[in-house]
Amino acid sequence: MHTCDTLVRADWIVTQNDTRDVIQDGAVAIQGGVIAAVGPFADISANWSAPETIDLGPSLLLPGLVNAHTHAPMTLMRGLADDLPLMQWLTDHIFPVEQKLTPELVRLSALLGCCEMLRTGTTCFYDMYLMEEAVADAVRETGMRARIGEVIFSFPTPAYADENAAFDVVRRMHAASADTPRIRTAVMPHALYTTSPQLLTRAHELAQELDIPLHIHLAETETETAQSLEKFGKRPVAYLDSLGLLTPTTLAAHCVDLTDDEVATLARTGAHVAHNPESNMKLASGIARVRDMQAAGVSLGLGTDGACSNNNLDMFAEMASCAMLQKVATLDPTAAPAQQVLDMATRGGAACLQWEEIGSIAPGKAADLTALDLDQPGLMPIYNPISHAVYAAGGGDVRFTMVDGHVLYRDGAFLTVDYPALCAEVRDAAEWIRKQTGAEAANK
Ligand SMILES: [Zn+2]
């Protein structure tokens, strides 16, 4: 008999391991935040004893979902402006608020984002924003896992006066994250249309020097492609490749407007792609060629993008949208099947984040887990748990989320956050934003 810290038991376990095993009446043995064993409850309980058993009963246990591209602090601007073209939306509504951001506002909205993610089954996220050190504080406080990075523009922001100062922030964040294994960093130039070739090259060099990944928005719209052709004489993917920035540690968010050659380039370079179907739909950016990228062997993850262009951080909803959008785009109901989409939201996300220890329930992996409540009417009956995870479930069906062996959310309660106090602070901050934007007058 072995001993461990915790046993988690559930009616169904979707492991997402290499053979995609699904276990009925299963259990996971957890020791020191790491999965020691997984299997049928009868086998696990015969071999492992623990002071604590969390028996989830009629639940579907999954590896925690991985949000491969988001901007967690944008929760504070959720619903502030919708139904507008991307550039008008950004310049008239989002950038004016962002010009007045403070670290305290960023921390508060990142805390809200973390709560929403835990509530909807996400345990790890790849986050790009201004004043990202405040996001690190929220990640530390909540107990989540994240790869974070200060977004770098060629122009001044409230977070830094110039490019040099922005790169200093990246170095400082990287050094500060060394003592928290749940937090890793990346270098994050915003996009081709908000940076210079010199900045991009410098970002690549810093990523190599610090041995961390690089994360950038790429090929999001046809407008971006037109600008890239005009300025650089190349389409976005070809241009970034010519600068040497597409590597196996690069994550490109969006990749909507791609030619066949560009799909092949992404596959050849080993760069990863974060697909954001709901944001792409809402901003009318277009439909990423997920089926073609999958066929070409491109490494794919799934993300929500920020809460302003989605308008939620619910990865269960994102999975359904991903599958549906590919089917309607290709007029092929076999496109983006449930297992492939679940792979994108788990193992694929782990690859995008360069985080080997997450993405499946298997011995040696981090104990990052989430569970759906199978007593919910919308999840009954159950024949195929993978179908349910992708097509039937919403984040509101989540009843349990664990990171690193610690329960962070269970049956309505956030265990690391004073949620009522957070709500009060968020309401106060929203009042302030209303005043800044004149939304108060507009709403009357
Ligand atoms: Zn984005």
Image: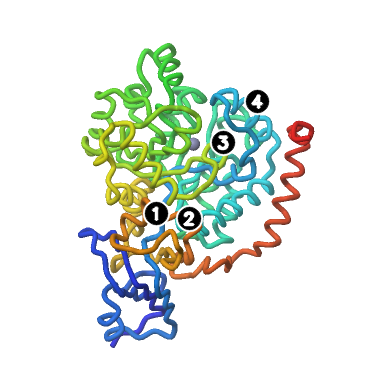
Rendering coords of residue 392 (x, y %): 39, 54
The circle drawn on residue 283 is none
Asked whether 344 or 379 is in front, the reply is: 379
On screen, residue 296 versus residue 109, left or right, reads left
Residue drawn at 44 percent across, 13 percent down? 231
- The residue at which mark 2 appears reads as 395
User: Which of the marked residues, 2 or 4, is nearer the chain's N terminus?
Assistant: 4
- Mark 2–mark 4 Cα distance, whole angstroms, equals 31 Å
- The residue at which mark 1 appears reads as 392
Q: How is the image coloured?
A: rainbow
Residue drawn at 69 percent across, 62 percent down? 420
Secondary structure under tag 4 reads: helix
On screen, residue 293 versus residue 283, left or right, reads left
- The residue at which mark 3 appears reads as 166
On screen, residue 375 versus residue 103, left or right, reads left
Asked whether 320 or 1 is in front, the reply is: 320
Whether the residue carrying mark 4 lies under 8 Å from ligand 1 is answered with no
Asked whether 50 or 164 is in front, the reply is: 50
Rendering coords of residue 185 (x, y %): 46, 48
- Say if residue 269 shows up in the picture: no
- The residue at which mark 4 appears reads as 92
- The 10 Å Cα crowd at callout 2, few under 14, some 14 to 19, many 20 or more, is many
